[in-house]
Image: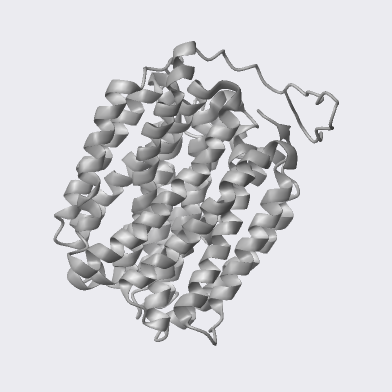
Amino acid sequence: MSSTDERPVSGQAIPSVPTHAEPEAVPARALERRGLVFAIVSIGLFMASVDQTIVSTALPSIEHDLRAGINWSGWTIAIYALGQVIAMPMAGKISDMYGRKKVFVISAAVFTLSSLCCGFAHDMVLLLLPRFTQALGGGAFMPSATGIVSDHFGPERDRAVGMFTSILPVGGIIGPIAGGVFVSYWSWRGIFLVNVPIGLVLIALTLKFIPASGKRPASPIDFRGISLLAVGIATAMFGITYLGSGAIPLYSPVFLASEAVAAVTLLAFIRHSKTHPAPFVQYRLLRGRGFGIMNLINLVYGAAALGFAALVPLYAQDRYHIAPLGAGTLLTARAVGMIAVAGVATMALRRTGYRLPMVIGFLVLAGGLLMMSFSPDISPYAWLAIAAAITGCGMGLAVPAANNASLQLAPDQVAAITGLRGMFRQSGSIIAVSVTTAVIARSSHPGLVQAHVFIAFIAALVVIVALARLVPNHYGNW
């Protein structure tokens, strides 16, 4: 049973406000295999999450080896987010239409082959092209994996999906450490090549153990909508990055033209979604008190938690001259904090509802970022590690609620909504990385500038705390 804005009371039935059709019964065989299925799809999520953090430790090495400025080497993070923005909604829709297993296997193959190409790149362009393709594969993991888990866990799917919040930070632990190890003892190329054997194992396990899922009637893929969104984000990124080369003025025609094209194409994308019969992103999933507020929250969360946090190792190296391996472990501290809280927060969701953990979690995240912005009297590494762990605790508290708050609004479209949620979070990440690296490139004191950017994202988090109070609350499962 489930309800909206109703608290469960001991000894009383929970009032139910049906908002959707009941999910189909889960086959007995699916229930028997669900532990194994969860473990297999978690490998894909693990690889995708590792590649969000592993590159951040290697940015200075990539910048030096490929002779590119920090504003362009930062694209190795931003273009990964762009690929995920495109892939997530598209993969959600395609996995509903053609089957989750098929999309998951293809994603793993694309991710693995692209990782191999990244590992042998010898200039920035030849690195960014396969990095973008790698992101398409990585971005398709979450929607298809969420659909697979939803198919196998029945009434427990809210908790199973919530546990992804504990699985993903494992990549946050491994990624920065692995990146530091590869950079310190071998080469940044190892951060990509390590995905190849893992990807091959994942493909084999998926083909053998995950059963095929049902399909929905096929509808045409909205290539125009995909193109509008991709062009809008890419041109905005290019303009900001071009401005960040250091000597380009704000009135540069290239910068102004790029941002104008971005604004026009993004407005056209919204209009297209409103009028197209089968849009890339349904217009009703972009607006309203439910989806509209959650999309804005996910955008700001992606900027403050995913985007700028990916640059924390660079901040530690620029401001405090911490070695790459040590700087990478700061993200490990964040992941440990997230894991420590996420499991408990997930299990408590049916009684806490969604609003309370989101409000408290975002405030804790803001407090951790505030600590990072100050120069400590103690060891800089110890101070940053504590602050990073606090930000992780805030993320672990808020994210399970934010994930389920979106899915509960339309449980019959799990994969599509997961993709939309990821699209907004990765868009926020792109904004944060592009703007921050551009500002750093124009500054003579990059570490201090990053500290000031922390303050800007703290202000944004305070704003979404107020928005979180408007999220449709929910108690029980969905």
Quarter of the picture holding the C terminus:
top right
State whether residue 423 is above or below residue 362.
above
- The answer to whether residue 211 is seen in the rendering is yes
Q: Residue at x 70, y 56 (%)?
A: 360
- The answer to whether residue 288 is seen in the rendering is no
Residue 78 pos. (x, y %): 38, 57
Q: Colour scheme in the image? A: one colour
Nearer to the camera, 277 or 39 = 39
Nearer to the camera, 350 or 115 = 350
State whether residue 193 is above or below residue 75.
above
Q: Residue at x 20, y 57 (%)?
A: 190
Q: Residue at x 44, y 69 (%)?
A: 312
Residue 435 pos. (x, y %): 45, 67
Residue 270 pos. (x, y %): 54, 41
Residue 215 pos. (x, y %): 43, 15
In screen coordinates, is 393 left or right of 224? right
Quarter of the picture holding the N terminus:
top right
In screen coordinates, is 321 left or right of 454? left
Nearer to the camera, 38 or 188 = 38
Q: Residue at x 33, y 24 (%)?
A: 102
